[in-house]
Image (cartoon, helix red, strand yellow):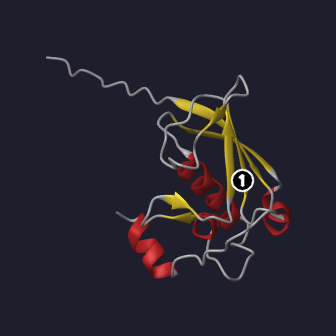
Amino acid sequence: MTTAKLKLEIRMKKIKLVIHEPLINKIIGNELNLLLDDKTNVVDAINEADRLINNKGGFPLPDYKSLLHMVYNPVENRFYKQAAVTAYNEQNQMLNVRDNAKKELPEETTIILIPTGGCISEWEEALDYKKFLKATSR
């Protein structure tokens, strides 16, 4: 009797993440070409940027513990008002990721993230980091 070998096919997508934040750019640059899981979303891409930042010594902005902590409220599954986030597919069509942070991204998506957008009319404080961690661990 032979044992069947299980072949796992892991599918990945190319995602470009452009971050406009000088202190982060000094650490990892302003443009990341990421290879992420097939079911990836904007939150996953930002998490990968955080992993790269942590590998280079940690998050450089003292009021936050990570880029995701800086721009995203996991309790309400939304980006903070001051965070500018847009995404475009290969054909340069805009994807509405602001209203759906967990929306699956197509191959070759470009995400532009400005953690503290230039035209801010309202500012929201980030969640307490313990609450943030609790909400993201669900």
Q: In this image, 86 relative to 98: left or right?
A: right
The one nearer the camera, 120 or 3, is 120
Q: Is mark 1 on a helix, strand or loop?
A: strand
- Circle 1 crowding by C-alpha within 10 Å: few under 14, some 14–19, many from 20: many
Residue 78, how many percent across, how many down? 51, 58
Above or below residue 42? Residue 130 is: below
Q: As drawn, which residue projects farthest toward the front?
A: 121
Q: Which residue lies furthest to the left in this view?
A: 1
**Residue 23 placement (x, y as % from top left):** 82, 69
**Which of the two residues, 104 or 80, is positioned nearer the viewer here?**
80
| Residue found at x 60% / y 78% | 125
Residue farthest to the top, as pictured:
1
* Residue found at x 52% / y 50%: 101
The residue under label 1 is 113
Which residue appears at 64% of the width and 77% of the height? 64
Closest to the observer: 70 or 120? 120
Residue type marked 1: Leu
Placement of the N terminus among the 4 image quadrants: top left
Residue 102 position in % (x across, y down): 48, 47
Q: Please provide percent x and percent y for residue 133.
A: 45, 72
Left or right of 44, for residue 54: right
Q: Report the quarter where the C terminus lies.
A: bottom left
Q: Quadrant of residue 131?
A: bottom left
Residue at image point 70% right, 63% down = 53
